[in-house]
Image (spheres, coloured by chain):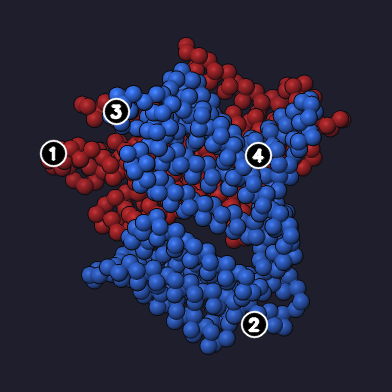
Chain colours: A red, B blue
């Protein structure tokens, strides 16, 4: 087993323990809690907050992936070419919008709760995925495309069997970026009353309870790092497979 | 499709017509209650509405011309002028007899029209591909027009401007703090990141150690990062002699600054390494052949050639930091985030806008300016290194 695998396993165990048996960590966080104040966040179970947080991110990211990849396929077809410069500009400009501002701007329209958070996560998540998918689909090796056409593959066959598999690693890199941003933005979502792990940190900030801040920060941070790591591994595996089929 | 029509232009025209039929403004009895929508044709006097409507429809129609991007740009400006006209004339009229506490805010129709017209402008510009100098002129013109509209008092009846007037001094302080946080951490990141990047370029082992650590820092969600900085800096202030005197404390400016700095290092270091790696080996070889020392080669050849990529790293950092500095509002670090989170607490949507809109404008303008700088840097080094 490599050092990376050991570290990965240890961090995962630590994360599970922090979420499922938070009381066990009371002695660790106790020095940071205010005199006589609560050490471990127990207003809501950390497990339910974590699941809520992850579900929000998963829902927003899968919807964003679906829409972004569809749009990217559309603008890389000849019929959608007129929209390509525009879509490039929109992704460039859109990514300068701060995620927090997108979240805050969604509130006047959608009210408080999970709704605006979901919309903000979705809208913001679109951009990196769309950008990567568009780049990947428009820079495929011309020879491979020529060969696919020469083999008599139809347009849909080419898309499903050649273009998307070859573009998958780059698209996945976009998804990874988008998921990491979504995990962070969902944390801020608790300021608009979405039930996420940010609640623990905010509660700590409001009551000057550093123990809460550390506890929430540690859990969110571990989730982000481990998910990022898992997606990187997946990406490498898919890239290897795409590389193998490209050679074969 | 008829020839000569721009497909995006058609899309904008269709979206624009739909947006015209949405409520244009909201009239509320006070700053926090729910309001009622006012449609465009009721939002101002009939004469004003007719002129503005004509301007917007003409603008969208000009946007249909595929072959004439300048007309399309003009169309978007014409439409925007119509939009501002209704808003400035309409606000005062709607407030008449609506009570002292009544507020008028732009509603979905206005925002959608604004978005459509801005997209038309963006589409025209992406076809025109103006050079950096022209882009700078256009940016200055747009900002000048915006400043003129805001200072002329034409929009002073709007709720967001009333929120501004109620805290003009606080807004000025927040703006200064926001800029100080974003640009200060940018400066610090450049001061640390450029030398670190150069070292990483030369020593593969350092690169192998530094880049993963910096990427790890980037994945930590911002709220968690800001939160974790609080106990760290409180500890520093309590234990390091003199730290508290120079303003280091657990809450406020210092933790926000440090969190932003940590996020900034990866783009700066990674882009410095990428820029230096991309310098053509022939140029470095030639410099070595000319008998240039290591230091001469770095300053005279490698850095000027890597400059555009290094600046692109700074652009990423600047845009990212302007956005992240909003979170500082949660830990007493000031900046525009103060208004965003106050507004969220009071459910006062115009106060949220007062914090969010300047942040968006600041990020957008910084991104455009940095892009222009990158373009300039791409052009000059050839002459300098010759």
* Label 4 vs 2, first from the N-terminus: 2
Which chain letter goes with mark 4?
B
At x 24%, y 46%, the residue is A156
Task: Residue A235: tell me if it is visible.
Answer: no
Are the residues flagged by discs 1 and 4 from a single subunit? Answer: no
**Mark 4 or mark 2, whichever is nearer to me:** 4
Q: Are marks 1 and 2 in contact (CB under 8 Å)?
A: no
Q: Which residue is mark 2?
A: B93
Q: In the drawing, does residue A134 fall left or right of residue B3?
A: right
- Disc number for residue B257: 4
User: Is the residue A84 above or below the residue A33 in the image?
Assistant: below
Q: Which residue is mark 3?
A: B286
Q: Is residue A97 left or right of residue B132?
A: right
Task: Characterize the local packing of mark 1: few (<14), some (14-19) or many (20 or more) Cα atoms within 10 angstroms.
Answer: few
Say which residue appears at 29% left-offset and 28% top-offset.
B286
Q: Which mark is residue B103?
A: none
- Crowd band around label 3 with a 10 angstrom C-alpha radius: few (<14), some (14–19), many (20+): few
Q: Residue furthest top?
A: A1
- Measure how far apart labels 1 and 2 are at the Cα level: 69 Å
Say yes or no: labels 4 and 2 on the same chain: yes
| Camera sees residue B99 | yes
Q: Which mark is residue A151?
A: 1
Q: Earlier in the sequence, mark 4 or mark 3?
A: 4
Assess disc 4: are there few (<14), some (14-19) or many (≥20) residues with their C-alpha within 10 Å of its C-alpha.
many
What is the total number of numbered labels drawn onto the structure image? Answer: 4
SS of the residue at dot 2? helix
Nearer-the-camera pick, A233 or A128: A128
Image: A153 above or below B126:
above
């Amino acid at each position: 087993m490599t050092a990376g695998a050991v570290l990965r396993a240890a961090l995962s165990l630590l994360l599970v323990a922090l979420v499922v048996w938070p009381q066990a960590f009371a002695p660790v966080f106790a020095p940071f809690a205010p005199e006589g104040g609560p050490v471990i966040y127990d207003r809501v179970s950390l497990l339910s907050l974590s699941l809520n947080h992850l579900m929000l991110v998963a829902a927003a990211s899968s919807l964003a992936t679906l829409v972004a990849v569809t749009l990217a396929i559309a603008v890389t077809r000849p019929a959608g070419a007129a929209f390509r410069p525009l879509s490039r500009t929109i992704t460039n400009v859109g990514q300068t919008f701060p995620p927090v501002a997108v979240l805050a701007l969604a509130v006047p329209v959608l009210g408080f709760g999970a709704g605006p958070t979901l919309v903000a996560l979705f809208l913001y998540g679109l951009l990196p995925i769309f950008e990567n998918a568009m780049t990947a689909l428009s820079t495929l090796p011309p020879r491979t495309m020529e060969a696919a056409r020469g083999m008599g593959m139809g347009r849909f066959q080419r898309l499903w069997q050649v273009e998307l598999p070859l573009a998958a690693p780059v698209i996945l890199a976009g998804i990874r970026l988008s998921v990491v941003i979504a995990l962070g933005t969902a944390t801020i979502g608790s300021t608009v009353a979405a039930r996420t792990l940010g609640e623990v940190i905010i509660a700590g900030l409001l009551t000057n309870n550093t123990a809460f801040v550390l506890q929430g920060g540690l859990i969110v941070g571990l989730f982000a790092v481990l998910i990022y790591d898992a997606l990187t591994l997946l990406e490498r595996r898919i890239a290897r497979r795409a590389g193998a089929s490209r050679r074969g | 499709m008829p020839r000569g029509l721009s497909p995006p232009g058609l899309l904008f025209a269709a979206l624009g017509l739909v947006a015209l039929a949405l409520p244009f403004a909201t009239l509320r009895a006070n700053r926090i209650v729910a309001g009622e929508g006012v449609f465009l044709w009721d939002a101002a006097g009939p004469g004003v509405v007719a002129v503005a409507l004509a301007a917007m429809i003409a603008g969208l129609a000009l946007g249909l011309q595929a072959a004439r991007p300048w007309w399309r740009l003009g169309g978007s400006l014409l439409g925007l002028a119509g939009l501002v006209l209704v808003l400035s004339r309409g606000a005062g009229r709607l407030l008449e007899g609506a009570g002292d506490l009544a507020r008028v805010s732009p509603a979905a129709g206005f925002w959608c029209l604004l978005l459509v017209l801005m997209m038309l402008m963006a589409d025209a510009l992406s076809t025109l591909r103006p050079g950096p100098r022209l882009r700078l002129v256009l940016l200055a013109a747009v900002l000048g027009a915006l400043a003129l509209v805001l200072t002329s008092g034409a929009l002073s009846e709007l709720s967001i401007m009333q929120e501004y007037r109620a805290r003009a001094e606080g807004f000025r302080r927040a703006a200064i703090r926001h800029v100080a946080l974003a640009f200060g951490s940018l400066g610090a990141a450049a001061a640390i990141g450029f030398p670190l990047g150069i070292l990483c370029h030369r020593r593969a082992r350092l690169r192998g150690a530094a880049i993963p650590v910096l990427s790890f820092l980037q994945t930590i969600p911002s709220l968690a990062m800001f939160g974790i900085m609080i106990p760290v800096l409180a500890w520093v202030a309590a234990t390091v002699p003199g730290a508290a005197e120079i303003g280091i404390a657990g809450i406020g400016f210092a933790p926000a600054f440090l969190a932003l700095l940590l996020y900034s290092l990866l783009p700066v270091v990674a882009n410095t390494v990428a820029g230096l790696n991309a310098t053509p080996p022939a140029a470095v070889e030639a410099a070595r052949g000319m008998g240039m020392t290591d230091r001469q080669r770095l300053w005279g050849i490698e850095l000027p050639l890597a400059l555009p990529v290094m600046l692109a790293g700074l652009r990423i950092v600047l845009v990212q930091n302007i956005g992240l500095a909003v979170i500082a509002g949660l830990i007493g670090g000031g900046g525009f985030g103060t208004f965003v989170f106050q507004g969220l607490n009071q459910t006062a949507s115009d106060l949220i806008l007062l914090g969010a809109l300047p942040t968006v404008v600041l990020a957008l303008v910084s991104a455009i300016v940095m892009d222009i700088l990158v373009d300039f840097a791409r052009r000059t080094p050839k002459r300098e290194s010759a």
